[in-house]
Every structure is written in structure tokens, then in C-alpha cells.
Amino acid sequence: MNYKKILSIFALSSLLFSSCDDQKMEWYDDPTHGDVTIDELPLKLAEKISRYDALKTYTDITLGVGVGMELYMTDDTYRTLAEENFDELTVGYAMKHGPMVNSKGEVEFEAADAFMAKTQEAGLSVFGHTLVWHSNQNASYLNGLIAPTVIPGSGGSNSLDISGLQDGTFAGWNLANVSDGITVVEGAGLSSEAKAVQLIASATASNPWNLQLITPDIPVVSGHNYEISFFIKSDQAGKGRLSFSGLVNNYPWKDWYATGGSWTEAFETSTQWQQVKITVNDFNDVSFKIAFDLGYLPGVTYYIDVDNVKVTDLDAPVEEVNFISNGDFESATLDPWGGWGNSSTREVSAEGEGFGGTGYCMVLTNPSAANLWSAQQVYWFDSALEQDKEYTCTFMIKASTAAAIQLQLQSDDYSANYYGGISVGAAWSQVSLKMTPTTADRTKFVIDFGETAATYYIDDIVLTDGSTGTSGPTIIEKTDEEKAQIIEDSMTSWISQMVGHYKDGIFAWDVVNEPMRESGEVRDGNVSDPAADEFYWQKYMGKDYAVKAFNLARQYGNATDVLFINDYNLETNHTKLDGLISYVQYIEQQGAQVDGIGTQMHISADTDKDMIAGMFEKLAASGKLIKVSELDVRLGTKNPTAEQLAAQAEMYQYVIDMFMQYIPEAQRYGITIWGISDSEQEHEYWLPEESPNLWDANYNRKHAYKGAADGLAGKDVSEDFSGALDY
């Protein structure tokens, strides 16, 4: 490419009348620049570099730069360098899925719109980076879309008798208006194993009561609040309500989904399951009934998950689960307790001898002193306790004389966890201790009381893990097909909004970024420990995720938009490069169009030059537009030597030379330098403690600036004004 703009003789002569010091790069005002001193980098070279024109004047290809949006908007020097030297800006982060999409899946355009307006004022174009990638995604939102449906456990037992739904007989239920049918269908519920009530509205349905299912009587406690909840969906847009008998207001308007939204007469249904959940408390009787009124719209089929139709007393007392069923002995029996040893006896006390002078307690008598385990009382659990789980044991105890007991959590082979040293006095006292089974086969709770000849009174034995009698959550996993559809819909929403919104301002996009493994295969997304911002679209949509992405970008953008696929390490891994080119061919075989291939080129000063040249040769053979999309040259330090700076400059020039040599003019989209300066602001996250760019940390031109300019011009530009420096 020919040098487009050579300094005029007039311009050069005017420079001669200026002080040499005035022409120095600013960092030469300091005796050192990192490890580079004035002696190591000749003044003449600094003078040459200072006389170079803006980079974009040396080439006809699109010359781009990667920028930080906030820096561009707030730092005048940074913005000026970007606008003077480049044609096109690529935002490094702020226009990707992660920062653009909020927790509700909405695309927030405000910051990007302000950036776009400022670039348009400057006459710069913007390259869209990037639509579909696995990094910098709002992964929490996307994962939330495909997360299992978690139905919280009931706060208490179900006050509604659903047995007539579970067995399909509708016993106790009233099918008041069946319309085109009310039946129970296997496998139609929240999971493939769950049942659902299917209710079909007739073609003439127009009133809510035209399709109606009514519950049995539900007993209530006056003054208590009752939560009604169920899951419902329909085969098309539907509408329903709950009406009642036994309330002061039998036709209430409600916030049916408990979202803090508006109160309405009816709720809307769709093809997706959603939970209806309301609270009622205005009872005028000892029971009430619920009517599911679904006759608003004709021809709609509704499904209500059977097992999750619930009415829960929110004010019912909550008690912890006691793994010892007869710990208060109020049954006046010891069942299922048993014991043996040392001629000991066991019985239930007389009524009124329990703790507090009421009820019953367990009475254990050891007639003579022996070993602790010589006399034992045992409770058998229904199933073994959970290994390594902490349980709390409490009970009330007294004895006829000062004594000691021991507790065990014991297995059938008599191995156990022991809890000894429990002192007992003549007055009632509470024992409380933590017990943790160390194996998964602890099936017995044992009281050892053989050490002292005494009579023991024991009451209110509780062994709990802190749980209540409420049911645990119900977890409904989405099928692979459901996940694929949800993620495809989300991709459609994202690309259609992003590309559509900037249809009049962005005309080139990275549609798919970094799709390839180093082995040359397409990533499948099966990553065991993804980062917080990683989401692999291909894990759910398969290899054709890129086909969908390119088709969407074409559909919602302009017919003439230039659409790229982009990847890294192509200059050092030709197997990966070959795989990417093959993937482009596959995408096009599936009916999408890929206009260009981007090669990132995050390289070092000592990267294999033959491999770089070979990459460009292979890319040229693809026939696609080629873009060097993220070029920088690392040196391994933020304080480079003069030799390192020279090597960096040489590598920048070499890359550009090879691009010009091997990529035919018609295939040259352009080159994007990844970042402007070596400042900490730009390199807080990307290549910290490095010096990869054309300007130093103080925005002064480096030796690399000359290398890039010479490569773009196709010659050593300084030769055009070298004579002006001979003074």
C-alpha cells in the first residue's frame, strides 16, 4: 500500500526553524522511560517518530482500534488519539451481552447510545463486538432461564384434599361445568412423571363459569391466613380466575402471581408453566370452597399440575421434626422403646409424674452399680440417620440419687458414637447436646444407665436436625429440548435488539467469537467449572448455534452488513485455523452467510514469523474478507529495554507487511490495533504489567508507532524527512 501523505518540503523546513527540544517526544523530558534512557534510544529516532503523521493517513484499509468506552467518553487525550489515528472503533467490553443485558433480559442502550453519538460526531465508524461469545455474558440471567423450576415446600400440611385428583376419580370434587372435558392426564404435569388436570373450554365458552372445577370443603381456623397456590399453563393464550364460596368476598380481584403488581379480575395463562399464588382470610364459615373458573375464552385447553394444588394455613404452629416418635410418652406406653441388662426395669410413670407435674414420663430402674452399658434403653429409628449431619438432642431428666448416664448413636453391628459424662441430679433438669453420626448406618438411640443404682425419670426426648414438618422443595428439571428452545429464543431476543437498534450506525459485526478449541474442533460448551460470566450457547443449541446467530444478524441488520467469525491463536496453531475455516464452510452449507474471518493476533515480539505468514496465506485461500481484529505485541514487561522496543516495532511492521503481501486487496477488510496506550487504565484487566501498544503509559508514541506506520505505508516513512534531521 502506497504512502498516502508525505510531509511537504514546506512543512519540513518550518520544523527546522523550531528548537530541537520542541520536537522531542514528551517522555524525553524525563531522563528515563522505564529502562530506556536517552542514550539507549537515539534522539534522532525520537525526532523521526515525532514527525510521523496520524496512522490512518498511511493506508486505505480500515484502520481500527480497540477502546474502553468509559475512557473514550471521559479522557480527552485518549479520545483525541483515537479520533486522529483511526477510522473505526471497537469497544473492548461495554457493548457485549454481559454489560448490555440486565437481570430481566432487557437490553440497556443508554451508555452505548451516548458513545455512538460521540463517534458519529467525530466521523468514526464502530465495529460491533461481539454478538455471541462464551465470555462476558450475563450468565446468571441465561442460566436462570434454564434453571429447574423450584417449587418451595409447603409451610405446613395441605388443607385441601387432592386425593380425588391423584387417583383420577375426582372424589369430593365438583365438575360443575365440564365444557369439552375435565380429565386427569398422566405425564402432563410439571414433569414427565407428573399428572395434570386437563380442562378444555368449548368453542362457545365466553363466561368464566362455562368451564368450572370446584374443590371439596376446606376446613379453616377463624383469623388464620390461607395461601392458595397451583401451577397452570394452556395450549394458547388463556384466561382464568378463582371464585369462592364461604368468603365475605367470593369474587375477589387479586395480584394472582404475587409479584407486587396490580390487582385484576383474572389471571393470564400461556404455554409456559406459571404459579398462581394468593392469600385469603375473610371467612364467614368453618370451611370454604374454591372454583377454578376457566371459561373466559373458547377453545383453550388448560393444564393444572395435580400434586402442587395446595391450600396452606400460614398461621399454623410450626414444630420441628422429632426423630423419636414417642419421646413424651403421652401414649402411656413405651412402644417402640425396649431395653435390657443388669435386671433393670422400664415402665411408664403414673399420670401426673411427668415433667412439670403433668402427663407421663419414662421410668428406668437400675438395681445395682455396674458398667454404664450394663443397663440400656433403646429406640429404633425408622431409617438410619444421615451421616455427618448435626442433630440436637434435648430431654428432661432426674434421678433418685446423684448419678451419670451416657448416650449412643449405634449401628446394628454395635459400633457407635458415644456421648458420656452426663450428670443427673434429684431435680428435673434439661440435657442438651449435639450429636453427629459418623457413618451412614446409625439406626439406634441408646441410653446407658448401668453405672449407678438409681431410678431415672426421663421426659420430652427430642432428636432433631432443625427441620420442620413442612415438605421440601419440588424441583422440576427442564428437558434438553426445552432448554434449547429457551436459549434459542434468548439469542433471538439479544441479536434482534442489538443489531436492530444499531442498524443505522453499525455495519460490521463479530457475530460469533472464539468458537474453536485448540484441537481444531468446535467447542461443545461442556466446561466443568465455567467462570461467572461464561455461558456456552452451543452447549444447548449444538454446533448450529453459529448458523442461527449469522442468520439472525442478517435478518435484523442490513443486507450489506459485513458479518465476521473471529478467533485467536490462529497464527500459532494452524490446526485450529484449518478447523475454523472448515467451520465457516459448514455454517454456509447450512444456509447462513459468513462474510469475513477475524484473526485476533495477541502475539509476542518473538512469535514465529513463518507461522504468521502461513496463517495469512491460508486465510487468503478462504476467499473471505480478512480482518486482523485485535493486534497487540507483548514484551513480557512494562519496563522494556530499547532492544525490546525495537523488536516490538519490527513485529508490528512484519504483521502488517504480511497482511498486505498475502491478503489480496479485495479481501482486506482492515487491521484493528487492540488498545491505544500502555496505561494502567487500559491494562487493569487485559495484560497487566505489560507494554503491548503503540503509545506509552503517558500517551507518547513508542518505537512501535513507527513500525506500524511503516507497515501501513509500505516503506520507511522517515526516509521522506530524514534529511531534515541532519543538523
Image (cartoon, rainbow, N blue to C red):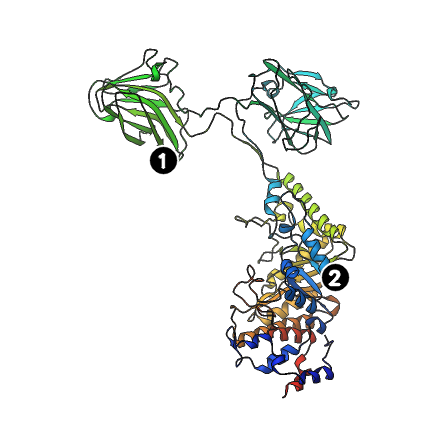
Residue 508 visible, this orientation = no
Q: Which residue is mark 1?
A: 438
Residue furthest left in the image:
369
Q: Is residue 664 left or right of residue 24?
A: right
Is residue 142 placed above or below 195 in the rendered structure? below
Of 576 and 272, nearer the camera is 272
Secondary structure type for disc 1: loop
Mark 2 or 1, nearer chain start: 2
> Which residue is at 52% across, 81% downward?
39
Answer above or below: position of 254 versus 629: above
**Residue at mark 2:** 121
Indicate the quadrant where residue 668 lies. bottom right
Image mark count: 2
Which quadrant, please, contains the N terminus? bottom right
- Give the class, few, some or many, for how many residues have Cα within 10 Å of label 1's Cα (few <14, many ≥20): some
Residue closer to the observer: 659 or 396: 396
Q: Label 2 vs label 1: CA separation?
A: 71 Å
Is there a contact, CB below 8 Å, between mark 2 and mark 1? Answer: no
Amino acid bearing label 2: Glu
Mark nearer the viewer, 2 or 1: 2
Furthest-bottom residue in this view: 727
Looking at the picture, tell me which residue is in the foreground, 698 or 155. Answer: 698
Q: Position of residue 701 (x, y in %)?
A: 61, 73
> Where in the figure is residue 420, as x and y percent of width and height?
28, 30
Direction from residue 57 to residue 696 in the image, left or right: left
SS state under label 2? helix
Q: Residue at x 24, y 18 (%)?
A: 400
Locate the C terminus and report the quarter of the image it occupies. Answer: bottom right
- Residue 34 seen anywhere in this rendered image of the structure: yes
Q: Amino acid at mark 1?
A: Thr
The quadrant where residue 657 appears: bottom right
